[in-house]
Image (spheres, rainbow, N blue to C red):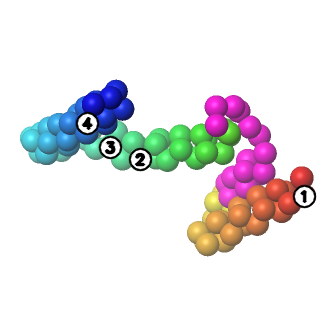
Amino acid sequence: MNAFWVATIGTSVIAFALKYAGHNVPEKIFAHPKIQSINALIPIALLSALVAVQTLSEKSKLMIDHRLAGVGVAMLALFLKAPFPVVVLSAAFTSAAIYNWL
């Protein structure tokens, strides 16, 4: 068994243990308002980090290109309270237009 399989099995065991431990936490801990506010913000932070990494990186380098313009147009559309399909399509069209222009 090589190091890859040891790492794969090890991370699987750790993920299972964390999930199992999460199911055994008493409900009164999650009922605390501070914990509820933190739990509400975690998905927002993770999604924001994912968007930033996918927008500004190419392999291991910082890259500013057409994707940043698409995200900028999407942010503008969200600020103007556009419907979600309009946000996605405007970002896609902007990104594609700049990609084809460059």
Q: SS class of the residue under badge 2?
A: helix
Q: Nearer the viewer, residue 100 or 39?
A: 100
One can see residue 79 in this view: yes
Mark 2 and mark 1 lie on one chain; the one further toward the N terminus is 2
Circle 3 crowding by C-alpha within 10 Å: few under 14, some 14–19, many from 20: few
Q: Which residues are magenta?
A: 59-75
Q: Give amino acid for label 2.
A: Pro
Secondary structure of the residue carrying tag 3 is: helix
Residue 37 place in picture, x, y as percent: 33, 42
Residue type, mark 1 in image: Trp
Distance, label 4 to label 2, CA atoms, is 26 Å
| Front: mark 2 or 1 | 1
Dot 1: within a 10 Å radius of its alpha carbon, few (fewer than 14), some, or many (20 or more) residues? few
Quadrant of the image containing the N terminus: top left
Give me the disc on residue 39.
3
Q: Residues within 10 Å of mark 2 (few under 14, many from 20)?
A: few
* Residue found at the very far front of the displayed protein: 1
Task: Please name the residue that numbered disc 1 is placed on.
Answer: 101
Q: Is residue 61 magenta?
A: yes
Cβ–Cβ below 8 Å for labels 2 and 1?
no
Q: Residue at coordinates 34% horizontally, 39% vertically from top-left?
A: 38
- Asked whether residue 62 is drawn in magenta, I would say yes
Q: Residue at x 64, y 37 (%)?
A: 59
What separation in Å lies between label 3 and label 2 (alpha carbons)? 8 Å
Residue identified by numbered label 2: 43
6 to the left or right of 44: left
Work out how far the residue at label 3 is from the one at label 1, CA to CA, in angstroms: 42 Å
Comes first in the chain, label 1 or label 4: 4
Q: Residues within 10 Å of mark 4 (few under 14, many from 20)?
A: few
* In the image: residue 78, left or right of residue 42: right
Q: Position of residue 34 (x, y in %)?
A: 28, 37
Q: Give the residue pinned by disc 4.
A: 9
